């Protein structure tokens, strides 16, 4: 794919937590308006890589990062870069739904206020974001209801709505369905496929079937290294590396 279509990239990235070498010469390129899955056994570096793009390791003691993490051609770790502005461009959805202890409406407007979006635009943005996240019809008459009273699946869709309200360019998802029931998982997967029309999405998942259902491209990581990447169908049906084959066929995990 031509470089102008690459939205997010890692170039020769190494990351250490103290003496522990967690990411080793990682190279990855995430195409615009596609879903890319990061798969691999626990501890292989998937979430560490994902969180690196959102600058979530900044406050962790003894972290050292070498190489380049790029949003298009912007170095995410440039000392002049505003972390607040970067996180506005790169949204994050976590494994466990984390709505604020506020109303549904206030969950969406909280980020708008912080980022200086005029109050007159809030109502329209709230409605649009909830519609984009497939939850508007379920909550439109209860926007003053505490978000914590929503079901787990609804809370996760609300968190996605909170993310898209700021119109990021990239959405990072760290196992967004692992705490959800099958029906809620299906709704989130349908949402992910729809959202790629507007956003570039990178998802960490342990669910091999989920990766095959939602991802255009898949990266397999093992012990901090990228072992193989390519179109999702190729990774699962015709892997080139024996280690990849062993993982996707369930020989280890």
Image (spheres, helix red, strand yellow):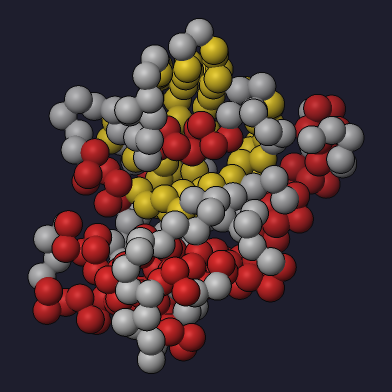
Task: Classify 38 as above or below 120.
Answer: above
* One can see residue 70 in this view: no
**How far across and down, in percent of the image, does residue 193 sit?**
56, 66
Question: Residue at coordinates 19% horizontally, 38% vertically from top-left?
Answer: 82
Q: What is the quadrant of residue 216 in the picture?
A: bottom right
In the picture provided, is 25 more to the left or to the right than 216? left
Question: Residue at coordinates 38% horizontally, 91% vertically from top-left?
Answer: 141
Q: What is the quadrant of residue 145 in the picture?
A: bottom left
Quadrant where the C terminus is found in the figure: top right
User: Closer to the camera, 67 or 174?
Assistant: 174
Task: Classify 155 as above or below 41.
Answer: below
User: Closer to the camera, 238 or 15?
Assistant: 15
User: Closer to the camera, 232 or 45?
Assistant: 45
Question: Residue at coordinates 39% horizontally, 15% vertically from top-left?
Answer: 62
Q: Which residue is farthest top?
A: 19
Q: Which residue is farthest bottom?
A: 141
**How far across and down, in percent of the image, does residue 27 sit?**
52, 27
In the picture provided, is 152 more to the left or to the right than 233? left
**How far across and down, in percent of the image, does residue 6 sit?**
43, 43
In the picture provided, is 106 more to the left or to the right than 164? left
Total of numbered circles in the picture?
A: 0
* One can see residue 44 in this view: yes
Task: Classify 90 as above or below 157.
Answer: above
Question: Residue at coordinates 49% horizontally, 51% vertically from top-left?
Answer: 94
**How far across and down, in percent of the image, does residue 71 sit?**
34, 40
């Amino acid at each position: 794919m031509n470089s102008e279509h690459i939205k997010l990239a890692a170039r020769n990235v190494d990351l250490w937590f103290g003496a522990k070498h967690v990411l080793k010469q990682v190279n990855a390129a995430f195409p615009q308006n596609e879903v890319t899955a990061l798969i691999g056994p626990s501890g292989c570096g998937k979430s560490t890589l994902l969180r690196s793009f959102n600058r979530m390791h900044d406050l962790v003691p003894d972290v050292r990062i070498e190489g380049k993490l790029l949003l298009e051609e912007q170095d995410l770790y440039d000392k002049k870069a505003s972390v607040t502005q970067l996180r506005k461009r790169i949204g994050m959805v976590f494994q466990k739904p984390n709505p604020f202890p506020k109303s549904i409406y206030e969950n969406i407007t909280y980020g708008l206020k912080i980022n200086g979006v005029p109050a007159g635009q809030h109502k329209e943005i709230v409605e649009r974001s909830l519609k984009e996240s497939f939850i508007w019809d379920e909550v439109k008459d209860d926007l003053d209801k505490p978000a914590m009273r929503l079901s787990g699946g609804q809370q996760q869709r609300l968190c996605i709505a909170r993310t898209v309200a700021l119109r990021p360019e990239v959405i990072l998802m760290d196992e967004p369905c692992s705490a959800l029931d099958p029906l809620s998982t299906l709704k989130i997967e349908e949402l992910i496929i729809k959202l790629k029309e507007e956003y570039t999405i990178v998802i960490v998942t342990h669910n091999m079937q989920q990766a095959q259902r939602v991802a255009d491209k898949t990266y397999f990581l093992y012990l901090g290294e990228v072992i193989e990447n390519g179109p999702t169908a190729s990774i699962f049906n015709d892997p080139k590396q024996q280690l990849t084959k062993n993982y996707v066929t369930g020989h280890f995990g």
